[in-house]
Image (cartoon, helix red, strand yellow):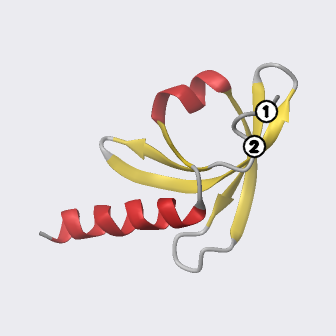
Amino acid sequence: MDLLKGKYFHIYENGEIERQGMVVGAVGLEYYLIQYFDFLIGEPSDMSLVTLSDISGNYKIYETAEEMRTAYERSLKHINN
């Protein structure tokens, strides 16, 4: 069962959101295909294969796109204050 499929994420580096996207699904036992989204227009951009250990490290997982957007908006407010 692919528990990460359809989940949304932010990738954090140095405490800041660097990328955002969605897990498309598992590819074998160790890899996941992910779809990145552009920050400005929110449209899909490139795709990548990542390992489960990558996801476990720098990714914050969200159940819905709305949760991901809310987290991003909160991070912007934090930066601007």
Q: Tag on residue 2? A: 1
Name above or below for residue 12 compared with residue 19: above
Residue, far bottom:
41
Name the quadrant containing residue 41: bottom right
Q: Tag on residue 19? A: none
Amino acid under disc 2:
Lys
Tell me the distance, in whole angstroms, between the alpha carbons under discs 2 and 1.
6 Å
Name above or below for residue 34 compared with residue 50: below
Side of 30 relative to 66 (left or right): right
Q: Are marks 2 and 1 in contact (CB under 8 Å)?
A: yes
Residue sitting at x 49%, y 59%: 68
Side of 25 relative to 44 (left or right): right
Q: Position of residue 26 (x, y in %)?
A: 81, 33
Q: Position of residue 50 (x, y in %)?
A: 69, 33
Name above or below for residue 59 compared with residue 7: above
Name the quadrant containing residue 36: bottom right
Side of 75 relative to 70 (left or right): left
- Look at mark 2 in the image and give the residue it sits on: 5
Amino acid under disc 1:
Asp
Numbered circles on residues, count: 2
